[in-house]
Image (cartoon, rainbow, N blue to C red):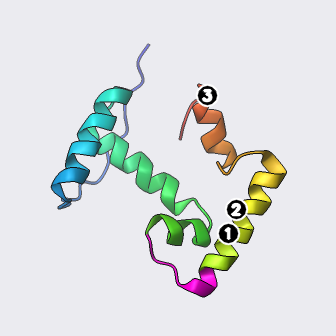
Amino acid sequence: MKTAKSEGTFLRLQIAEDAKTSLERQASRHGMSQTELASRLVGWLVGQPQLVQAAVLNNINSTVDADLSASLRARIGATGSAATPKASRASRGGKSP
């Protein structure tokens, strides 16, 4: 039984051609629409600690860079992976957000 997807708000985005190609490829690979993939990525990003967000967005300075490195080393040491628990569960075939 398929569940109905919730209606969302639409936002028009302009992205670089290479990013569009990558989005198309990944959406196809995962069997979802580009809109759904982009929405999940944004949802994942905003759920990350600010240091991780800054690193992903390439918006860090040298002071924050050292904090990020220490934070990621601590996370890897504690869990054996830099992935968040949700991301780890999804990569093992669990349901993603």
Left or right: residue 41 versus residue 13 is: right
Q: Whole-percent x and y of residue 78?
A: 83, 52
The residue identified by callout 1 is 69
Mark 3 and mark 2: Cα distance apart in space: 23 Å
In the image, residue 70 sits, relative to residue 34, either above or below, namely below
Local secondary structure at mark 3: loop
The amino acid marked with disc number 1 is Ser
Write the residue at 37% across / 49% down: 39
Which label sits in the foreground, 3 or 2?
A: 2
The amino acid marked with disc number 2 is Leu
Q: Whole-percent x and y of residue 68?
A: 65, 71
Q: Count the marks.
A: 3
Q: Nearer the viewer, residue 6 or 17?
A: 17
Local secondary structure at mark 2: helix
Assess whether residue 60 is covered by the magenta stretch.
yes
Mark 1 and mark 3: Cα distance apart in space: 28 Å
Assess disc 1: are there few (<14), some (14-19) or many (≥20) residues with their C-alpha within 10 Å of its C-alpha.
some
Q: Are marks 1 and 3 in contact (CB under 8 Å)?
A: no
Magenta stretch: give its range. 58-64
Mark 2 and mark 1: Cα distance apart in space: 5 Å
Local secondary structure at mark 1: helix
The residue identified by callout 3 is 94
Rendered image: mark on residue 51:
none
Write the residue at 31% across / 35% down: 27
Quick one: label 1 or label 3, which is nearer the N terminus? 1
The residue identified by callout 2 is 72
The amino acid marked with disc number 3 is Gly
Q: Quadrant of residue 66?
A: bottom right
Write the residue at 28% across / 44% down: 23
Q: Are marks 2 and 1 in contact (CB under 8 Å)?
A: yes
